[in-house]
Image (cartoon, helix red, strand yellow):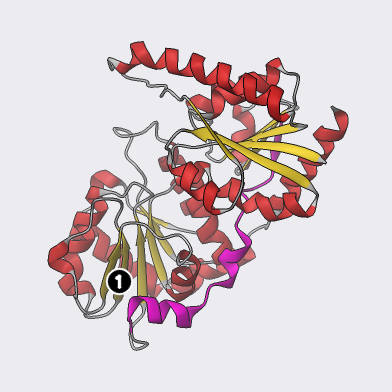
Amino acid sequence: MKKIILTGGGTAGHVTPNIALLPRLQELGYEIAYIGSYNGIEKGLIEAAHIPYYGISSGKLRRYFDLKNFSDPMKVLKGYAQARSLMHRLKPDIVFSKGGFVSVPVVLAAKHARIPVIIHESDITPGLANRLAIPSASKVCCNFPETLEHLPEGKAVVTGSPIRRELFHGDREKAYAYTGFTQDKPVILIIGGSLGSQVINEAVRGLLPTLLKTYQIIHLCGKGNLDPTLHNTTGYVQYEYVTDELTDLFALSDLVISRAGANAICELKALCKPNILIPLSRAASRGDQILNAGSFQKQGFSYVIEEEELTGETLLNGISSVWENRESYIRAMRESEKTDAINAITGLIEEMRKKK
């Protein structure tokens, strides 16, 4: 039996590409295990997919001063020891990492055990965790051609991002039943990321009286961000987070407002959904979402509003512009070069396993 360990966590974007690979890996005969943090978002998502899950200690790598910077290295060392033990116990043929802080000790443990590692970098420039892990990798997959200049020559391969198969099979009728919406108005889906976005939530809710005259709104607002005063508002539904229903909600949506995480925007491109991207600001991130959004805007896939420029007026103008020009956005996405990321990545996995 061929064996593979998948790793990655911290946000949904570090997990969903791994989930997208599962059916093909199973078709290829792999026994799959997953290493993540004790209680990260990845735990529930992977266990729901009925994949054996192993939690390890995980510390966060910060670019700013925090007292936890003194204690977290010990967590990372503990996670490394646990990962080494799991390598010995599970004896994988190969490790595939989607990044996030929990993946670093796993990748380093795999290198120590002489197990080949393939890493996937979603953003244009590698994040800190992947930068630490890349020297231990055999291959590094990426989404954007622009990323190649930031990766070691000979290791990098442009594969695109794995998209879950079920995403293409959403059911509009199920979404109508789930939301209680009618068919007389178009639908806007707002996705603030798995943790939600206060600035997007406030901008959207401030515009509701105006937007609901023309549109119906599905608002994925993040854990703890429901507004009870808006329950039972006609044409507006809010959810902290959805899993199985997301495919149906995408099928129902005519326009999507989203953060600019690489996996999220690759899904929008694959589904050819007209969209507005509101990337995380440099004050709250390393600026990767700004680069992602800029690339998509340049290619004609997206309308971009910088977070610092987000107001009710700029959001309303953006929605009007995208709606009026939605066919041009759809056409640009349909005519763009498509990559079969799942087969490209699993092909690399097979190749590196055989070279072991």
Which of the image's four quarters has the N terminus? top right
For the residue labelled by badge 1, is the local secondary structure a helix, a strand or a loop?
strand
Magenta residues, start to end: 155-181
User: Is residue 134 in view from this perspective?
Assistant: no
Residue 45, percent from left and from top: 50, 49
Q: Is residue 51 left or right of residue 65?
A: right
180 magenta-colored: yes
Q: Is residue 299 left or right of residue 87?
A: left
The residue lying at 42 percent from left, 22 percent from top is: 59
Image position of 270 with respect to 59: above or below = below
The residue lying at 38 percent from left, 76 percent from top is: 178
The amino acid on which the numbered mark 1 sits, given as a three-letter code, is: Ile
Q: Is residue 350 left or right of residue 259?
A: right
Which of the image's four quarters has the C terminus? top right
User: Is residue 8 in view from this perspective?
Assistant: yes
The residue lying at 50 percent from left, 60 percent from top is: 268
As rendered, which of 296 and 353 lies closer to the eye? Answer: 353
As rendered, which of 356 and 50 lies closer to the eye? Answer: 50
Q: Quadrant of residue 107?
A: top right
- Residue identified by numbered label 1: 217
As rendered, which of 328 and 39 lies closer to the eye? Answer: 39
Count of labels in the image? 1
The residue at the far front in this view is 89
The residue at the far left in this view is 229
The residue at the far bottom in this view is 184
Residue 301, percent from left and from top: 50, 59
Residue 264, percent from left and from top: 48, 52
239 magenta-colored: no
